[in-house]
Amino acid sequence: MIKKRKYKFTSLLFAFGILVVLAIGLFIERNGINYTSKQSSYYLNVSQVKTKSEALSAIPVNNLVIFNSSNETSASAINNFKQLFEDMKVSTAYVDVATETIPDFTSYKSVVVLTPDIEPLGVKAIELMDWVEAGGNVMFAMTIQKDNMSSIIEHKLGVVTSAYEYALVNKVHIKDGFMLGGGKDYKIDEAFESAWGVELDSSAHVHMTTADDNKTPLIWDYQLGSGRVVVDNFGIYVKAMRGFYSASYSLLDDVGVYPVINSAAFTLDDFPSPVPNGDGKYIKHDYHMNISEFYTNVWWPNMISLSEKYGIKYTGVVIENYENDTSGKIKRQSDSSRFTYFGNMLLQMGGEIGYHGYNHQPFSLSNVDYGDAFEYHTWPNTKAIGNSLNELIRFTNSLFPTEEKSVYVPPSNILSVEARDFIVKKYPQIKVIASSYFSKTFEYEQEFAVANDGMIEEPRISSGTIIDDYIKLTMVSELNMHYVSHHFVHPDDPLDVDRGAKLGWDRMFENLSKQMDWLYKAAPNIRNQTESQMGGAIQRFSSITVTKEVTDAAFTFKLGNFVDEAYLMVRINKGEIGKVSGGELEHLTGNLYLLHATNNTVTIQRK
């Protein structure tokens, strides 16, 4: 019998195998998970896209806005309402009662009174209400001032009695079924006595009140003869309230309809990037980790869990380094392990990579003086800016060579006019600029739009983990105005006391999670998109127009500049709906629906 030989190094082979497994694990950790691209471009061809003003120019004017440039409140609100109706694709004529004669109402389907002082309208105010009674539609968009003329017409607004005093609006209650996010109370920043004290006819339909014992009516509609009256009585006309006015306007007529974007995007600013600078004392206290370990073992797993729970597609915008050199001299990033690790995982989750900066210095030339607002440096010329962008593009292409990268987020939302023009002319691969919906010092303020030069403007409307009352109100408004959510989170939020670091990351993440929970309960089927996909949605939103035909048998919507699909908010104010052709209706809340149009003509049968 031949005996089997016993090898003394068998245990060494076992140990070697363990080392190989560990090495593979370390390689994966350092380089991220391999990914296959899951994204296909949603952009339209340039020839298929129109700006909102170009699209509106082809639509007959059917709405009249009456304002008063000599009234401070009216004058300050007019531009905001012009933007509102442009976004709703309501072709509108504007008449200034301080300098112009009010035209015949019979040329229009709706009239919006954008002045609190009714007396300058004179006898036209009485003619207006007679026109409504005969079948017209009017919206009083500003808190009405009690005077002789308003006293004459107030009963035709559904008002039984009225006072000269105004009620405090420090919290509002949106009736369930009126707006997305309804059935809840929302606080108002810088509240004041802005609501006309009224008692309404029992037949008036009240959609929003003050959230106090008085329940002062803030939005209502009233059937006047064959026409309809809508009154907005909350007296706040800022950009953050547009969705309340779009919802109010949709109460007019048997059906209200306007285009929306239908998109929820979530951006991870400065991600991937080198380890953020900042005071990590709260992280060390709570987690006994350094900053790098915290991001790998706590922050990023939390963000993954949020994505998995709600289907969020993150857009990460890259910062190559945090140096302050703006001379145009380039120092390449030597350590790419963090970038590939986090970036590949983000891509595997269905996200995308965009551009933020070679460093975190905003693109402003030497003609900009930041003063005490920022410690940023300016750039000497566009050549230096170009050098930094070229390096950022080279760096991200070396890390993620198969991915289309088309989104640029300006550091701190700061972007000079000169730098923006330079980017548009020299970098056609950048199709989207994502900055801010609300202007602060030096910030580049945007609307959801396609600019005249073709750049897609894609503002964020909320950010961070301190979800204050203003952010909550804005998110409600934008769900109803554009059916959109666009939120930014910075990885270094837990390092910055001004952004919540003292609360601790657990509390910060809890705040963020609660707001995302609110969002997806209010709009459970909103499309989760990357920023480039939102860009394509904005192109379609910018181009589309809608004209409606209302008969006893059906509502018919004809869509101009239709390419492949469009989304529209539809409010059925009268009657029941039957068969839909040319698209699909999704019930949102109350009598509010989302229409997904798949044809340039959509018909909704009436029961």
Image (spheres, rainbow, N blue to C red):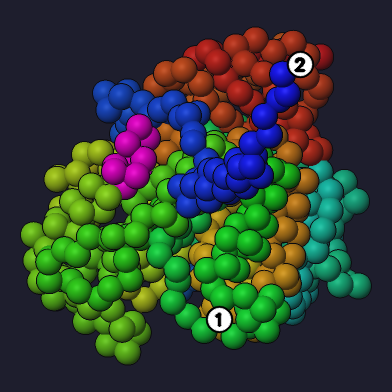
Q: Start and end of the magenta stretch? A: 396-407
In which quarter of the view is residue 78 placed?
Answer: bottom left
Image location (x, y in percent) of residue 214:
88, 72
Element type where label 2 sits in the image: loop
Q: Residue at x 41, y 54 (%)?
A: 337
Amino acid bearing label 1: Gly
In which quarter of the view is residue 210 placed?
Answer: bottom right
Q: Is residue 495 left or right of residue 274?
A: right
Q: Residue at x 19, y 59 (%)?
A: 388
Q: Is residue 505 above or below residue 431?
A: below
Q: Upstream in the sequence, badge 2 or badge 1?
A: 2
Residue at the far bottom in the pictured view: 372
Of residues 58 and 342, the one nearer the viewer is 342
Other residues around mark 2 within 10 Å, as few (<14) / some (14–19) / many (≥20): few
Disc 1 marks which residue? 280
Q: Is residue 85 left or right of residue 444?
A: right
Disc 2 marks which residue? 1
Is 7 magenta? The answer is no
Is 399 magenta? The answer is yes
Amino acid bearing label 2: Met
